Image: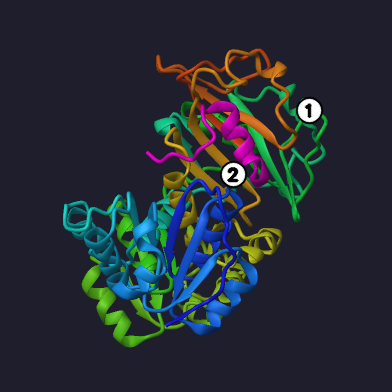
Amino acid sequence: MRQLNFPCILHFSMRILILGGGAVGASVARRLIREKNEIVIVEGSEEQCAQLEDTLDAKIVQGNAASIRTLQSAGLSDADMLIAVTNSDETNLLSCLIAQAHSDVKIKVARLRTHEVDLWRSVCGGQLLNIDLVIHPDRETAERIQRVVGLPGISDIQEFAEGKVTLVGMNIAAGSWLVGKSMEELKQSGPPSNTLMAMIFRGNQVIIPRGDDHLRAGDHVYIVALADQVSDTFRFMGVEEAERVKRVFIVGGKQIGIEVALQLEERGIQVKLFERELSRCKKISELVKDTVVVHADGTDQTTLVEENIEGIDAYLALTGDDEGNIISSLLSKRLGARKAIALVNRLDFLPMAQLLGINSIFSSRLVIVDRILQFVRKGHILSVTTFRQEEAEAIELVADAGPKFIGKKLKDLHLPRGAIVGSISRPSGEVIVPRGDSVIEAGDRVLLFCLERLVPELESAFIVGSGRETA
């Protein structure tokens, strides 16, 4: 075991031990470091440790995350939180068991990929492990995919305020009537009453729009609407809704492909799942019910034509190859698929994939980051949603009495450029998409959209205290 040198840093709000320095662990660490938490990462690979040391202001410990001595050397006894996101379910569970037995760590988070996650949740919540949050990224990503399978023009749909508020993402096509319209012109065009354009992604730029901002072809936009006005919002934006999803192709027989297939089966949708590895096909066949498992390359044009891809409702590229997923999604559109969905975990690929015209892009990595950030942040943070290259966030929080933004009209708050209030949910049950005269009161559930760098400032403006207490 090799421990790398790290300068002493004082006055951090939490001491967090992250097990696993891969893409997920590094991404989580990067965000938590920005928010002034003290981070220690345990990683087995010497090469990965060297890379982490070069890129992160964190303490890096090389060693086995399932070793008591390694965890003690990494400061387990002083940690406030343990986040186990190695590539091994067994290691993640064993490290939480070690933490339970040999430390007073207040919060434990573990990533599990097993299809038996439902059985493990009951075990993890018991006194033996006492894991506060079990994240199954494939299942959660699959649930997000489900929402948009039948909506060719929609990239993703997020729900807030216990399902009462919906966030809809979509691309602005070159022929859309929206091209060239300003926010003020859209407002005058008769949109549903409780809607709001919250964010515009344009190339590498993120825009929290104001009245004089105009839409351009190729923009990727997010619109807030009350749940009962989503269909009206689709019609206003010129988006077609599929009457019924009948046929879906899935490429990739890893856990996420299986999760999506199982969920589609429950909806009575015909699914073909393509997997190159014969032994994997046999295993998948034992797990699914009605899905047709095809031992073939689902990215091959001849194969797709033979399997009648033309006219299918959706083509889902869910392999572990980001580039392959992007290319095959484009191919599927050319061959007649109504919608293409790609799994892309390299965040720097996301803007390019959108510009190429892929309908929906999902990242399991961002799903994990969102759930963990929700746990780390103050207790009144209800949800965190990260967009694209972690440039922007949607934060759902409960406003405290006292902070400077409480009890004033929104038009008088002078929110920083790059931030907007998307919705307000009252304790009485009333939900509004606010306008300038709206007022946020203590106890309101507030949905904010902002650039990532503004998160700490906005949290302190709505929640009492500067420390990052956990729920």
Label 2: which secondary element: strand
- Horizontal side, residue 245 vs residue 289: left or right: right
* Res 127 label: none
Identify the amino acid type marked 2.
Glu
- Horizontal side, residue 359 vs residue 278: left or right: right
Q: 448 or 262, which lies in front?
A: 448
Alpha-carbon distance for marks 1 and 2?
A: 21 Å
Is there any visible trace of residue 262 in the rendered image?
yes
Is the residue 124 above or below the residue 461 in the image? below
Residue 188 at x, y percent in the picture: 75, 21
Return the residue at label 1.
211
- Horizontal side, residue 227 vs residue 328: left or right: left
Crowd class of label 2 (few under 14; some 14 to 19; many from 20; radius 10 Å): many
Residue 460 is covered by the magenta coloring: yes
Return the residue at label 2.
393
Q: Quadrant of the C terminus?
A: top left
Identify the amino acid type marked 1.
Gly
Residue 200 at x, y percent in the picture: 70, 43
* Lower sequence index among marks 1 and 2: 1
Residue 338 at x, y percent in the picture: 55, 58
Question: Which residue is drawn at the image coordinates 45% and 75% (left, top)?
Answer: 43
Crowd class of label 1 (few under 14; some 14 to 19; many from 20; radius 10 Å): few
Question: Which residue is drawn at the image coordinates 26% and 69% (left, top)?
Answer: 94
Q: 81 or 116, which lies in front?
A: 81
> Which numbered mark, 1 or 2, is in the foreground of this view?
2
Is there any visible trace of residue 270 in the rendered image?
no
Give the magenta range.
450-471
- Horizontal side, residue 146 vs residue 287: left or right: right
Give the number of marks.
2
Residue 257 at x, y percent in the picture: 39, 67
Quadrant of the rendered structure where residue 243 is?
Answer: top left
